[in-house]
Amino acid sequence: MTKVSFFDQENKPQYQRSFSEEFKKGKVRELEKNMSSVSDICTTYSVSRTSVYRWIYKYSVMAKKQVKQIVEAKSDTQKIKALEERIKELERIVGQKQLLLEFKDKMIEIAEATYGVDIKKKVGSKLSSGSTSTGKNTGKS
């Protein structure tokens, strides 16, 4: 089955682009500092991976020193975006939990008012006669 993008490319005029050496060196520096990835550059500037790797072999300081660099799969901006999305998701979850707690508190208040029973345990209140001890030994026999 033919992809739609194939037809889009077919209608576009073919032309050869060239990038300045300064542009190429700048992109290689970005790669070396892990500010962007090869795939980011390829998609942003519509450049083939082969071309980007040629730039790396030609302009990379590390390649000249014969030091192999492991390029991160994600750039810093992508990591930041992912973390921001995670924060939004967690804030949404916290908001839902807060609403649920408020709902339960209101339901307890309504039940207490309707049935005249104290459902919430008050801090520092004495145990009722039907309850058992907490398991602590008071020292009295």
Image (cartoon, helix red, strand yellow):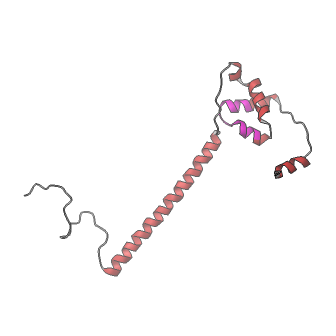
Q: Does the magenta-highlighted stretch encompass residue 39? A: yes
Q: Position of residue 24 (x, y in %)?
A: 78, 30
68 part of magenta stretch: no
Please say if 14 is above or below 54. Answer: below
Q: Residue at x 67, y 29 (%)?
A: 32
Residue 28: x and y in percent read: 73, 30
Specify the quadrant of the image occupied by residue 131.
bottom left
* Residue at image point 69% right, 33% down: 30
Residue in view at x 65 percent, y 24 percent: 68
**Going by the image, does 128 lie left or right of 25?**
left
**Left or right for 14, reference 98:** right
Q: How many marks?
A: 0
Residue 41 rendering spot, x and y as whole percentages: 74, 38
Relative to 21, 124 lies left or right: left
The main secondary structure of the magenta stretch is helix
- Residue at the extreme left of the image, as rendered: 141
**Magenta-tinted stretch:** 27-42
Which residue reaches farthest top?
65
Outermost residue toward the bottom in this view: 114
Q: Position of residue 85 (x, y in %)?
A: 59, 51
| Residue at the spot 18% in from the left edge and 55% down from the top edge | 136
Image-based side of 25 in relation to 137, left or right: right
Work out whether 59 lies above or below 35: above
- Residue nearer the viewer, 21 or 47: 47
In the rendered view of the protein, which quadrant contains the C terminus?
bottom left
